[in-house]
Image: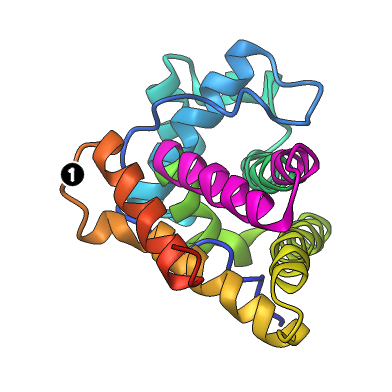
Amino acid sequence: MDAPERVFVPPAPRLPEQGLATTNLDLVTPRRQQILDIAAELFAARGFHGVSVVDLGAACGITGPALYKHFTSKDAMLAEMLVSISETLLEEGRARVAGAESPREAIEALIEWHIEFALSHRALIVVQDRDWSSLPDVARERVRALQRSYVDEWAMQLRQLDRSLTPETARASAHVVFGLINSTPHSGLLPDPQMHDLLREMALGALSLQ
């Protein structure tokens, strides 16, 4: 079984500051999103297989079977959760690149976006990295394709900035930055605004853009 692109590195779980308001899934109602956010926290803390439908229902303030009014199964919930974050990451990344006036500006915009994402969705990143293999086959392939496209957005801009980079080196450079940004909660003790600035400085340095 192929592994997904290592876009995410598992940080320590923390309550997200906001839901995935920018998700591409049209059927995400406020209540549905609330359930997804709660499920992400539980999955991050206990693992997908360590959380039952009864656990989810209790955390959401409803009976376990009542969850089936919103999701057909726990697997469907995980699939929506992880496809959604991958779609959001790629769509917003492309939007930031489109709004940039140069490759340098595009890379800076991608760094900014990835930092915002990582600081706001720690639990989701944990779930994606650890429970990706629990996804249904169709959802797993969708997540893999979305992540590859996201890496390619970075690699394309890096190669435009430095024509000497091979595609492989550009992709590897992107993964280095992903690892830097997403692994910091293991040792990050700073408030988010300060951590944001530190991450930006370190990411630019890793790409020799300071």
As drawn, 126 above or below 91: below
Spot the residue most to the left: 189
Relative horizontal placement of residue 182, taking residue 67 as reference (left or right): left
Q: Camera-side residue: 8 or 106?
A: 106
Helix, strand or loop at mark 1:
loop
Vertical order, 200 against 27 (above or below): below
Position of residue 89 measured from the top left corner of the image (x, y, whole percent): 66, 45
Quarter of the image for residue 197 reads top left
Residue 74 appearing in the image: yes
Overall secondary structure of the magenta section:
helix
Q: Nearer the viewer, residue 122 or 99?
A: 99
| x 81%, y 62%: residue | 145
Chosen colour scheme: rainbow
Where's the N terminus, which quadrant? bottom right
Q: Which residues are magenta?
A: 91-120
* Amino acid marked by disc 1: Leu
Residue occupied by mark 1:
190
Of 12 and 47, nearer the camera is: 12
- The residue located at (64%, 49%) in the rendering is 105
Residue at 51% across, 41% down: 117
Q: Residues within 10 Å of mark 1 (few under 14, many from 20)?
A: few
Percent position of residue 37, x then y: 49, 29
Is 78 displayed left or right of 45 in the figure?
Answer: right
Residue 10 seen in the figure: no
Location of residue 16 (image quadrant): top left
Residue 3 pos. (x, y %): 65, 77
Q: Quadrant of the C terminus?
A: bottom left
Residue 100 is inside the magenta segment: yes
Relative vertical location of residue 50 with respect to residue 9 in this rendering, above or below: above
Would residue 73 appear left or right of 13 to someone viewing this image?
Answer: right
Relative image position of residue 95 (x, y in whole percent):
76, 38
**Residue at (77%, 68%) from the top-left corner?**
160
